[in-house]
Amino acid sequence: MRIRRSWLLLIGIAATYAVAGSANGFRAARARNVLPTRAAEWIWSGDARRERGPSAFWAARDFTLDAVPASAVLQVQADPEYVLWLNGRRIGAGRFAEGAPLDGYEVAPLLEVGTNRLLAELRSDHGTGGFLLSLTEGSLGRQLLVSDPSWTILRRDDPNLLRGFRPLEGGAPAYSWSFPPIGRWGAPRLGAVRPIRFERGTPVPSTSRSGIPAREVRFAWGREGTVGRLALEVVPQEAVQIAVLRVQSEGERPDARSCAAISVILMPNQREWLDPQVRRIQAAEIVGTMRVEAARVLPPDGPEEGIAEPAVPSRGLLGLPVPPLRTPVEDEVGRQLERLPHL
């Protein structure tokens, strides 16, 4: 009797996988026809999805164009955060906010006939996350590029990657979580499209520095402060680096009550960290073994970029929430097994 019940259980699980596979195929077909990102999939590093510690890596893709369209709109979202580069130029950065629309960029001025390269620096203080991207002619035209398993994951930084001098070799294929909607990400919504700004203003270096290197270092920008993205120049290491950043926008000195911890995560050999959000910055403290050589604030990419709200402490390794990530098959199998009677 036990053998028979075991066989019935195995048959039930196999049938569940078949149903889930069919459901996933239906979801893919529906996504291509209904969702604004169509064939784009939520992807991540196959290794990092099993990790629970901090991770940072490149998701990279070369693609070819026979002609440059008059308009090319890139829509992107990443959880927890991303910095995006196209043909050696930074075009945007951002952090995930539940319910927020995709970040949109008009990138036609940066495209070239022949080979183009997109690089996304992705970070997570708890290992898991997701990245979704769609590049189309105009707002809703033909898709030129989407996030899918053909992307390459590279776990070590190299300046030649951005310049296009190094081929995308030695990495691993991206892992696909599947098509939207999945996990906590819901159905993607198109966001406002920002133009590429070639003149971004002059970075503002810190006016003072104090503290002990590789323990706690404080940079300041005077009583008035400045607005923009914080950029840190760091001594590269051969392992993932992580530190805690406290940003002071006003008052005497940052503490646990006035500002929450922000994770600073760098992949091996990385020399610079860029805050994905625009902030009002009066001073910044970096706590940890990371050796920070200098700090400066990059002006916002445009007037449409708003200042980030003060961070709110939340659950997670360094104040960042952990998203519930499971594949559709795992979700469906779990639901089916819960319905089975106890043997």
Image (spheres, rainbow, N blue to C red):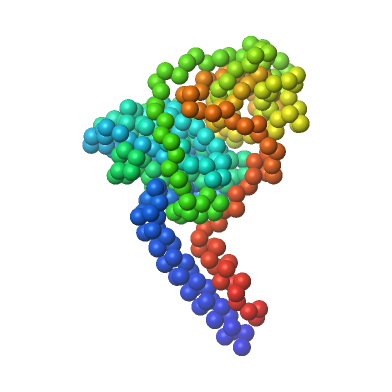
* Residue sitting at x 44%, y 39%: 191
**How far across and down, in percent of the image, does residue 10 sit?**
53, 76
**How far across and down, in percent of the image, does residue 113 sit?**
25, 32
* Residue sitting at x 46%, y 47%: 188
* Residue sitting at x 46%, y 31%: 92
The quadrant of the picture occupied by the N terminus is bottom right
Q: Is residue 170 visible?
A: no
* Residue sitting at x 63%, y 79%: 341
330 vs 92, nearest the viewer: 92
Depicted 293 relative to depicted 24: above or below = above
Depicted 187 relative to depicted 278: above or below = below
Q: Residue furthest left?
A: 66
Q: Is residue 338 left or right of residue 40?
A: right
**How far across and down, in percent of the image, does residue 184 sit?**
56, 51
The quadrant of the picture occupied by the C terminus is bottom right
**How far across and down, in percent of the image, does residue 28 sit?**
40, 58
Count the numbered circles shown: 0
Residue 254's quadrant in the figure?
top right
